Amino acid sequence: MSVSDRLRVKEVRLLSDHWSTLKTTTFDWLRSDGRWQECRRETYDRGNGAVLLLYSRERGTVILTKQFRYPVYVNGHDDLLIEAPAGKLDDATPEECIRAEAEQEVGFHVRTPRKVFEVYMSPGSVTERLHFFVAEYDPGDRIGLGGGLEHEGEDIEVLELTLDDALAMVARGEICDAKTIMLLQHAALAGLVPTGRPSR
């Protein structure tokens, strides 16, 4: 039995359609014991996205960003957020998106991005599916300063850290963005970047 066989949508109401789309839905769900149960859920649709970890095997480093995020600020994070470059797909493919975001946010041309997985980041309420990429870089791939798009309110600092330092920052709670932690751990587990190097 598919999920669609267990779902009867009764009502969908639009709550907001400003920056993204917020809806509330009433539906009946066929439980595992055979009973139908009425449920209500809100879904926030901001589109799908892509995220990239640029890494240098030779230098033992990764490229990250640092920027202000209002939603995490109002939830108690009184600091800029350290992240891997990312963005919404809009009408682009995931690879097109991540190439554009890398140039806009960190000023790097991406030579050979490789997709490693895709995930739902907050499936209880957010529809977004995020495509995860890694790509090797060298200093010659830098074609600009980065910093993001001012008309979108972006004011991005570019960080080059050793993977060891980045992982230590995760352990200390200084890097607390889920997508970034997932890519850093992937880099360590997959051996993309040698660890145990001295700090730069």
Image: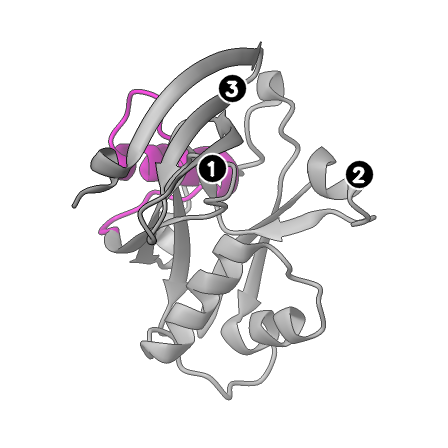
x and y, in percent, of residue 69 in the image: 69, 38
> Residue at 40% of width from left, 18% of height from top?
10
**Real-space Cα distance between discs 3 and 2?**
22 Å
Residue 35's tag is none
SS label for mark 3: strand
Q: Residues within 10 Å of mark 1 (few under 14, many from 20)?
A: few
Q: Which residue is mark 1?
A: 144
Q: Is residue 177 left or right of residue 135?
A: right
Query: Tag 1: residue type?
Result: Gly
Q: Which residue is mark 2?
A: 74
Quarter location, residue 168: bottom right
Q: Which residue is mark 3?
A: 23
- Relative to the observer, which residue lies in front, 84 or 155? 84
> Residue at 35% of width from left, 58% of height from top?
137
Q: Residues within 10 Å of mark 2 (few under 14, many from 20)?
A: few
x and y, in percent, of residue 81 in the image: 67, 49
> Residue at 18% of width from left, 42% of height from top?
2
SS label for mark 1: loop
Q: Earlier in the sequence, mark 3 or mark 1?
A: 3
Magenta residue span: 89-113
Query: Tag 3: residue type?
Result: Lys
Q: Earlier in the sequence, mark 3 or mark 2?
A: 3
Q: Is residue 122 left or right of residue 15?
A: left
**Real-space Cα distance between discs 1 and 2?**
32 Å
SS label for mark 2: helix
Q: Is residue 134 above or below residue 23?
A: below
